[in-house]
Image: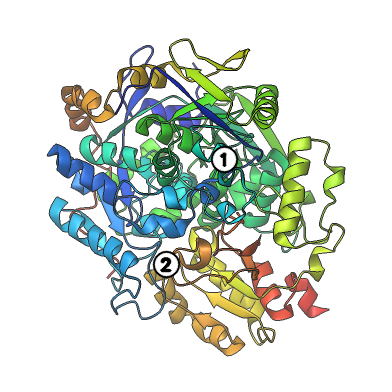
Amino acid sequence: MARTLSQKIWDDHVVRSNAGEPDLLYIDLQLCHEVTSPQAFDGLRLAGRRVRRPDLTLATEDHNTPTIDILAPIADPVSRLQVDTLRRNAAEFGLRLHSLGDKDQGVVHVVGPQLGLTQPGMTIVCGDSHTSTHGAFGALAFGIGTSEVEHVLATQTLPQARPKTMAVTITGRTPDEVTAKDIVLSLIARVGTGGGAGYVAEYRGDTIDRLSMEGRMTICNMSIEWGARAGLVAPDQTTLDYLRGRPHAPQGEDWEQACAYWRTLRSDPDAVFDREVEIDASQLTPFVTWGTNPGQGVGLDQAVPDPATFPDPVERAAAERALTYMALEAGTPMRQITVDTVFLGSCTNGRIEDLRLAASVIKGRRVASGVRLLVVPGSARVRSQAIGEGLDQVFLAAGAEWREAGCSMCLGMNPDTLGPGQRSASTSNRNFEGRQGKGSRTHLVSPAVAAATAVVGRLATPSDLSS
Amino acid sequence: MERFETHTGVGVPLRRSNVDTDQIIPAVYLKRVTRTGFEDGLFNSWRLDPGFVLNRPPYDRGTVLVAGPDFGTGSSREHAVWALQDYGFKAVISPRFGDIFKGNAGKAGLLTAQVDEAVVEALWQALEDRPGLEITVDLTSRRLSAGADSHPFLIDDYTRYRLLNGLDDISLTLAHEAEIAAFEAARPSFKPTTWPIRTAG
């Protein structure tokens, strides 16, 4: 029977299948970080269990870590205890850990791909919803809770109900200034934050084919923001070119064998998806959010919508609440919205191509007076690569803050936060109430829009700078 | 995990949709390394508002939460489930749940009952008209009732079976250790391992 890509990967990992029960899936790689793992390790200790496969597990420190003075003891004692706990657990259970100051430390979803540990056809989990990022390689990758983290540590498997499948076909040449981030924000606005619930989405079409691995990661990263459990892209030459030569990529005969397998990882031409969505990328424009969930977005050339125009009463009420929280008036052109802070970074947009794009926009310009631009590379290696290319000097010359790697201002649990009522343009993935600090107001944007906004002080695209 | 068969308790009308897990418990409460004591973080920013439903008796002693669609979207934090449980909630009723939240709830023993939007509307109205109205959530029959009204709810068969029997997933899986070992033995050699460490230098 014809199968989709995700069904093929699923079938290749079923340890046990029994009617009336979820399938027991083998997990090829578990990524860990300090926030969602301590209770899982405690559970192992209480039950006298070991980590079954330390060699299929990788840990890094990223969520509650500072991005300055990273080698000093963490000032917040609660954060420090959590990071120290991860270090103790890694030592006790024999796990590989990339700590602050290590060359391979960074946001967990940036570290896995750059080490070459993320490969096509794998099952990858992490106690973090943005694990969907790894789907860009044609891996089945999804976020799990702490109970499941413990389950995978103990058994290297996970009982999972087979998800439904969805094809998201994106076609057409993207106009100038439209990036992967704009594509996925547009998609979420169309299908809604719950539109993907219960599905694994496969992104495909010539627009996806032309995207770099990093662009594909940005799109897969935000799969969870429209409710999809995972999102993935079939591996192609772009995938292989990215992987070849990375530290943990297969070598020699293994590489040939792996490539032969990876080439089979495509949805069969006659495979049937449970649902299909089509996007014409040629009609897209730079896209930003106005509200408090990632589906509340519009083109940057549009205005804050009027809740009264929403036909669905639930959506209307949510829009009214969002405008109150965001302190926005319906009808205000998005370009008139001023920001205090611009955040460039995160597992969504903290990779080298994101930094290059933002640097190309900001080069020779200055961050607007009264605006703070925080540039946080997604990993220590992205940071050193950027320094090698002189990008740090571009940002510093513009008046930006150039930080060490981490989740930083994406989630308000480390020193990088917004104050109550402060407003940001952020390349991260969530604009929830309080996400960047209590009372914070977030507009999700692409790296290009982030850089232009930092210069103008209002939401802007690079073309606004030249005019 | 404790067995769950049926529960009766005060219903709480949470008239909001898209209640993401950052609203259920902000990230700043996630720094703890313990498994309990997260009730202070529950709906933390909303509870600053004296008019918020959980600040008003008798809702403040509620144990069955009735929320709008897309409850528990966003972050994978299981702390969202723990915070609800630590506060005293035994069940959440919504037309649609975030996938990861629903999975976490099933693991931790918090019942997620999926119903039509119209049922949520009716429950909201009933709970507001009669504060303190109790809701019974019967997992055996997969029905919930409030006053004279009774409605079926959805929960998948396997989660229901595990909750009814209070089963521990890891023990269930380890009963199949031989099958796991057999699968492992047949994995291709090109699959990556994190040890020994390889690095770009």
Callout 1 secondary element: loop
Q: Chain of mark 1?
A: B
Crowd class of label 1 (few under 14; some 14 to 19; many from 20; radius 10 Å): few
Q: Using a 10 Å C-alpha cutoff, classify the residue at mark 2 as few (fewer than 14 neighbours), some (14 to 19) or many (20 or more).
A: many
Q: Is residue A235 left or right of residue B131?
A: left
The residue tagged 1 is: B57
Question: Up-down: is A163 above or below A258?
Answer: above
Residue A290: tell me if it is visible.
no
Residue, disc 2: A406
Q: Residue furthest bottom?
A: A397
Residue at image position (27%, 36%) is A151
Q: Position of residue B3 (x, y in %)?
A: 32, 22
User: Which corner quadrant of the image does residue B104 belong to?
Assistant: top left
**Mark 2 to mark 1 CA distance (whole Å):** 42 Å
| Residue B110, above or below A105 | above
Position of residue A135 in the picture relative to residue A273 (left or right): left
